[in-house]
Image: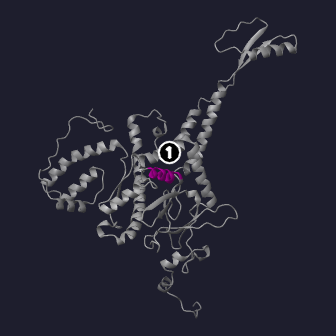
Amino acid sequence: MPPSSSAPRSTWWERLRRRPTLAQHQALTTPAEWRDPWEGPLLTTRDRGLPDRRTSLEQALEAWRVNPLARRIVELTTQYVVGGGIAVSCPHASTARFLRAFWEHPLNRMAVRVMEWCDELTRSGNLFILLSTDAAGMSYVRAVPASEIAEIRARPNDLDQPLAFWPRSGAEGAPPLTPWPAYDALSDAPHRGGGFAPAMLHYAINRPVGSQWGESDLAPLLRWLSRYSNWLEDRARLNRYRTAFLYVVRARFGSEGERLTRQQRLNATPPPPGSILVTDESETWEVLAPKLEADEAGQDGLALKKMIAAGAGLPLHFLAEPESATRTTAEAAGGPTYRRFEQRQRFFLWLLGDVLRAVVRRRAQVDRALPPRQRVDAEAEITLHGADLSARDNVALALAANHILAVLGELRDRALIDDAEVLRLAYRFCGETADIADLLARGRAAGPTATPFRRPPTPSGKVDLLSGDPK
């Protein structure tokens, strides 16, 4: 039998009770204190190291600045995700007025700032939002470059719960910078003199499980963007040299001085293209040109561009490379791309909604002294609507919904399906998701209309799915 120890063994429940509380975790400030007495700090090895991450961010920014393809990939993402703008709605009147004031504040200008945020999220894979609030409860948001954040300190037992964000140190010998605390809705409260401490929110895309940092959309493309740029530069240089030529004039000269005199005369007045030269038997003219065979280099460039398009999730015709594609193949290739933009748009709308909810919570704590009708509701529902990704989808969905309504109406009249199933299928063919139970409750509360709705007749003929115009 194994030797027994005289010290009593602690159970898992006793070890759990010895764990620090939330307030104790938030009071930790120095790196030596960021330890869990139960199991120690939870470290991740799936993130890039600081030098590697900084290099990747700098290369992505440099590629966006100088490479047209990298700039276009980032622009396309913003154009589809943000589009014509983002609309914010809230059923609570006071909250809606505050959101409108925050959105249009001169120091926020969210209508323009969301485009910059989407660019930064695509370019760096991380978005750090610094939230500052004055004594009146108005908040101001600023995006901090990901390259300026050196470390994310999270709870020892959960990487998804950040505690502080440490900025990159300045010059050597400079005093250490103060970290930004992470926003925590449970502990966020105003100071006694009014106002809130600045807090930071972090959002990431392309983040592997078990990592804190996201990855840029350009990260897997940097090597191929560089190779394509080098190939294109070499191709342009070869084409330039391929058209260059030299005249070689052969003649019998009595001395070196006569040859130099003839050469200086020809250099001073070289024959223009298309001119006629008349010489005697003592002088012959030849053309010396490089023989550079680069006819098959186009296939190499196309292969490099396909690699870039595949990594960016874009069809080639989005990158000015039609490749003799027809309209049918172009529409088929755009399907996965629209799905990718739709997923990114949903994430970006959730990101903005999370920032707006933090802003509203801070204002609600300031409005406690106001009458109930003038207070901002911290639990009010905030809905954000993005622009449509494709006009063709709207036309196709409208046609599908118009045709399915007749089938659903007949099934409902025969008592084969109920109202909930009618709504579910109708919204599905419209391409929208909805809370069916909530819609039914709201419909019953609204009651029937004075004039019953009559379904319009199905339009005759064919409709162009791209423009919606009749063929």
Question: Is disc 1 placed on a helix, strand or loop?
Answer: helix
Name which residue type carries label 1: Ile
> For the point 47% across and 59% down, which residue is it?
141
Q: Magenta stretch: give its range.
A: 112-123
* Residue highlighted by disc 1: 73
Q: Main secondary structure of the magenta part?
A: helix
Which residue is pictured at 69% across the width and 25% down the height? 290
> For the view shown, which residue lies furthest in the right direction?
255
The residue positioned farthest toward the bottom in the image shown: 6
Where 73 falls versus 435 (above or below)? Answer: above
- Quarter of the C terminus within the rendering: top left
Residue 309 visible here: no
Residue at 65% across, 26% down: 242
Image coordinates of residue 174 in percent, x first then y, are 67, 64
Above or below residue 69? Residue 283 is: above
> Badge 1: how crowded within 10 Å, few (<14), some, or many (20+)?
many
Vertical relation: 319 (above or below) 238: below
Question: Residue 232 location in percent, x, y?
Answer: 60, 36
Residue 439's x, y, as percent?
23, 59
Where does the N terminus fall, quadrant-wise?
A: bottom right
Give whichever of 127, 93 is nearer the camera.
93
Residue 186 lies in the magenta-colored region: no
| Location of residue 373 (image quadrant) | bottom left
Q: Quadrant of residue 288?
A: top right
Q: Residue at x 86, y 14 (%)?
A: 257
